């Protein structure tokens, strides 16, 4: 008898899943992925430093500014900011571009990207300021003095012990 009682909620769940459209499933999946990405904000950056170093070494970006810029471009904050901006754009703009003859990708690149330039520039400015202020990442990824940001260059090149050069 308990098996029949257990099948009732399962059947109701199956019926509910049949009624959900593919678009709603995709939205649910994106919300779950966004929640997981935002959960990574509570992970200290010191835990991700070694995997990031190995990735930068594999990409050949060690001793370049790319090793400092790339990790700060794809932060969960930047993804969340861009996602919120894209959600706030009216869907009618994309639909009007499709009606006028653009493909979905054409509507994205010709309509949505130009409208989202302020949000993209905001993320780039945040990434730039984060890159300039990072001391530990710069100390880990860059050893050439010409590629060092100011915070690292002053403390390693100009100051040696108590002697200022």
Image: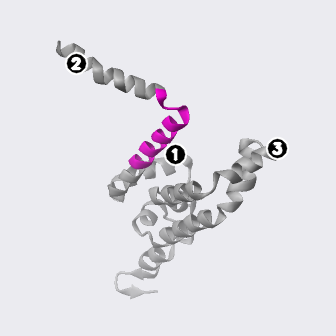
Report the residue marked by disc 1: 58
Task: Between residue 17 and residue 114, name the one nearer to us.
Answer: 17
Residues at circles 3 and 1 in contact by the CB criterion of under 8 Å: no
Is residue 76 visible to the viewer in this orientation of the structure?
yes
- Range covered by the magenta-colored residues: 19-36
| Real-space Cα separation, disc 2 to disc 3, in angstroms | 54 Å
Name, please, the residue furthest toward the top: 1
Magenta stretch: dominant SS? helix
Of the two numbered discs 3 and 1 on the same chain, state the one appearing first in sequence.
1
Left or right, residue 92 beside residue 81: right
Within 10 Å of disc 3 (Cα), the crowding (few <14, some 14-19, many 20+) is few
Of the two numbered discs 2 and 1 on the same chain, state the one appearing first in sequence.
2
Within 10 Å of disc 2 (Cα), the crowding (few <14, some 14-19, many 20+) is few
Of the two numbered discs 2 and 3 on the same chain, state the one appearing first in sequence.
2
Quadrant that contains the N terminus: top left
Q: Secondary structure at mark 1?
A: helix
């Amino acid at each position: 008898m308990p098996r029949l009682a257990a099948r009732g909620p399962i059947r109701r769940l199956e019926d509910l899943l049949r009624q959900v459209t593919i678009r709603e499933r995709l939205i649910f999946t994106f919300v779950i992925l966004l929640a997981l990405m935002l959960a990574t904000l509570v992970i200290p950056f010191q835990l991700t430093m070694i995997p990031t170093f190995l990735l930068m070494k594999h990409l050949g970006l060690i001793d370049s500014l790319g090793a400092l810029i790339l990790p700060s471009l794809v932060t969960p904050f930047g993804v969340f900011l861009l996602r919120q901006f894209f959600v706030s754009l009216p869907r009618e703009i994309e639909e009007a571009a499709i009606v006028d003859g653009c493909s979905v990708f054409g509507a994205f690149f010709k309509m949505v990207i130009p409208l989202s330039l302020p949000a993209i520039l905001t993320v780039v400015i945040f990434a730039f300021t984060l890159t300039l202020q990072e001391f530990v990442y710069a100390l880990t990824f860059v050893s050439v003095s010409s590629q060092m940001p100011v915070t690292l260059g002053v403390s390693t090149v100009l100051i040696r012990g108590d002697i200022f050069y």
